[in-house]
Image (tube, helix red, strand yellow):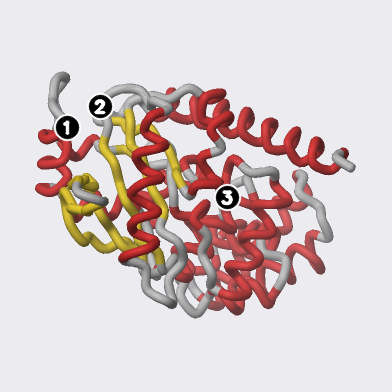
Amino acid sequence: MLYWNLGKRIHDEILAGERGEYGKQIVVAVARQLTTEYGNSFNQKQLWRMIQFAEVYPGEQIVVSLIRQLSWTHFVALIPLKDSLKRDFYAEMCRIERWSVRTLRKKVDSMLYERTALSRKPEELGRSELEKLRAEDQLTPDMVLKDPYILDFLGLQDRYLEKDFEDAILREMEQFLLELGVGFSFISRQYRIQIDDEDFYIDLLFYNRRLRRLFAIELKLGDFKAAYKGQMELYLRWLDKHERQEHEEPPLGLILCTGKKAEQIQLLELGRSGIHVAEYLTVLPSKDILKKEFQRAVEQARTRQTKRIEEVAREP
């Protein structure tokens, strides 16, 4: 709070919005005086960070709620993020999950926010969900589910079978749980369900403590096919009928595949059935390629959702 108050006072009372050459000279002079009196924690670089801190978090109440779990080093990692929605997402996830600074930096580097469904929503909807998270500590599936999932730690070669894929996940379960995200616990592999006189097997079954839901995961080697929807709906309805507890939300399904067609996914309206389709990467491309691909996907998704909202608004 000292750093925030100091940054805000310099910004409001001394700089008064001046960030040109004159403003730099003022900060240099203030830093020199404070360093002489109080030590190197108040050098010029640190003062600029404090000023930026007050700029990106102008409300004291938000800072007060975050500093219970976040250190100054957390804020130093968050301040450079220019997108306010992205910055708030990481701050709230740090607060709820008590990430270390190292974990936070790793999540940012892996572009976690860009891979969540939240980033693909129009900004007003994304902001609304974050406000609810801040007020009620209530996560939504869109904050947890990702696309794509980065599974380079599995060490899979060019050619492998679904069983190899599943075996690799079981071997690297700790890493897989970290990639799945907040609150997941492993229940079973090849979970058997019996319908009439037939046996069916769910590849992987998890439970999410934060969302209070069962998660059925199906592993596919090729592109997504429309038939996968019916298979997953069957599993989810069985789980809802036979395994769901009174206090739990309806089960969700995650289909992991190597590719998918956007229009096919849109027409199937998988979200209505509680199904999320995501690609997975077993080899991590360069960060620049990932960044461009995510930006394109986010822009396309936001455009589609905005058009859909406008269409609904025009309906009588």
Where, by quadrant of the figure, is residue 230 drawn? top left
- x and y percentages locating residue 113 in the rendered image: 50, 47
Q: Foreground: 290 or 124? A: 124
Looking at the image, is mark 2 or mark 3 nearer the viewer?
2
Residue 66, horizontal then vertical, whole percent: 55, 73
**Residue 83 in sight:** yes
Q: Residue furthest top?
A: 158
Q: Quadrant of residue 232?
A: top left
Q: CA distance from mark 1 to mark 3?
A: 35 Å
Mark linked to residue 298 = none
**Amino acid type indicated by mark 3:** Lys
The residue to which callout 2 is attached is 221
Q: CA distance from mark 2 to mark 3?
A: 32 Å
Horizontal side, residue 293 vs residue 130: left or right: left
Few, some or many residues within 10 Å of mark 3 (<14, 14–19, 20+) = many
Which label belongs to residue 162?
1
| Residue corresponding to mark 3 | 86
Which corner quadrant holds the C terminus? top right
